[in-house]
Image (cartoon, rainbow, N blue to C red):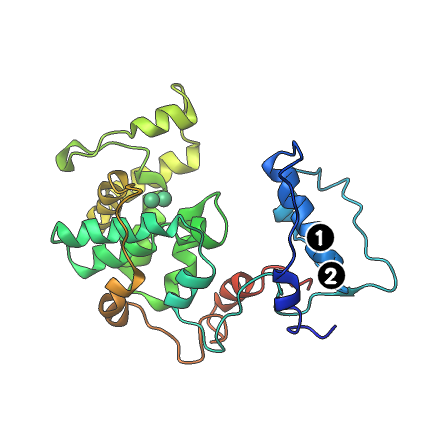
């Protein structure tokens, strides 16, 4: 089967799991196995995809001599346009948690903050939505750095640390949800504490702080906001490369390519 020809065939795959008592993870694995059985290419997962579920030092999923690998499009994913834009990543690659980004940006806009803050809110968790969760503020800042002004990427990086520290001057308290998620006694690691101390003294501190202010109250499952609501703000504040994100030879283009083709083997 030629790469790219297999989408329709694979998407017709139906696995009846209703009579099993599989966990969601087991069910996902079963669906994946059924889909892969229809391909003649092996989809190899990056170590990061499986680390923890398996001990990476013990993983022995070697390729056998006669197997082919995925070299481009994963037929299980919707295909990206040839010149992908930020909106395409929102639509075709980011998880439903993107609604949190859209709601945060909408809240910042309703509060009357400037476009720097609105675009920072719109982008602040894109790493969680499409790339890597841990240290998401750092990854997210890096992803957008060549395309936004320096203050925006600085603020996205800083929000990683600032969200753990209250600031009464703007009504930001330590999130109750963090007490539940991290436990009562959680103390952020030293690098986060140092980042916070340095961010507090920075001239752009308030931009990073306002991400946390609009972040906290913006989870509303009923409020639907579309990326189309931000087309103008994106146009003015995000330098969309004409070649497409990931194909523009910027220092982070490879990170966007990884989101386009997350299962390429090399
Ligand atoms: Fe965040
Ligand atoms: Fe957030």
Q: Nearer the viewer, residue 92 or 259?
A: 92
Q: Quadrant of the C terminus?
A: bottom right
Query: Which residue is most to the bottom?
Result: 242
Residue 142: where, in percent of width, then height?
42, 58
Task: Label 1, secondary structure: give it.
Answer: helix
Quick check: is the Cβ at mark 2 less than 8 Å away from ligand 2? no
Evaluate if marks 1 and 2 touch, with contact meaning CB atoms under 8 Å apart.
Answer: yes
User: Which class describes the residues within 10 Å of circle 2: few (<14), some (14-19), or many (20+)?
Assistant: few
Query: Which residue is most to the left?
Result: 112
Residue 144: where, in percent of width, then height?
38, 62
Q: Which mark is residue 62?
A: none
Quick check: is the Cβ at mark 1 less than 8 Å away from ligand 2? no
- Residue appearing at x 40%, y 71% in the figure: 85
- Residue appearing at x 24%, y 53% in the figure: 105
Of the four image quadrants, the one with ligand 1 is: top left
Viewed as shown, does residue 165 lie left or right of 244? left
**Residue assigned mark 2:** 38
Q: Quadrant of the N terminus?
A: bottom right
Whether 90 is drawn above or below 166: the answer is below
Q: Nearer the viewer, residue 51 or 152?
A: 51
Q: Is residue 52 visible?
A: no
**Residue assigned mark 1:** 34
Task: Label 2, secondary structure: give it.
Answer: loop
State which quadrant residue 242 falls in: bottom left
């Amino acid at each position: 089967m030629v790469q790219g020809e297999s989408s329709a065939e694979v998407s017709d795959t139906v696995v009846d799991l209703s009579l099993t008592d599989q966990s969601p993870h087991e069910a996902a694995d079963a669906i994946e196995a059924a889909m892969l059985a229809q391909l003649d290419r092996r989809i190899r997962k990056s170590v990061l995809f499986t680390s923890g579920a398996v001990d990476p030092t013990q993983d022995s999923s070697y390729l056998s001599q006669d197997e082919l690998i995925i070299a481009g499009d994963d037929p299980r994913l919707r295909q990206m346009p040839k010149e992908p834009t930020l909106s395409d990543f929102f639509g075709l690659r980011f998880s439903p948690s993107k609604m949190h980004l859209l709601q945060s940006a909408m809240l910042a806009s309703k509060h009357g903050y400037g476009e720097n803050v609105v675009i920072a809110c719109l982008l602040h968790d894109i790493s969680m939505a499409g790339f890597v969760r841990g240290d998401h503020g750092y990854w997210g800042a890096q992803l957008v750095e060549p395309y936004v002004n320096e203050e925006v990427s600085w603020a996205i990086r800083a929000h990683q640390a600032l969200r753990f520290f209250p600031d009464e001057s703007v009504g930001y308290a330590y999130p109750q949800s963090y007490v539940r998620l991290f436990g009562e006694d959680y103390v952020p690691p030293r690098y986060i504490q140092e980042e916070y101390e340095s961010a507090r003294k920075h001239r752009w501190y308030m931009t990073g702080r306002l991400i946390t202010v609009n972040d906290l109250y913006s989870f509303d499952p009923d409020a639907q906001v579309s990326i189309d609501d931000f087309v103008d703000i994106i146009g003015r504040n995000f330098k969309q490369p004409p070649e497409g994100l990931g194909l523009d030879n910027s220092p982070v283009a490879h990170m966007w390519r990884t989101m386009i083709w997350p299962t390429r083997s090399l």
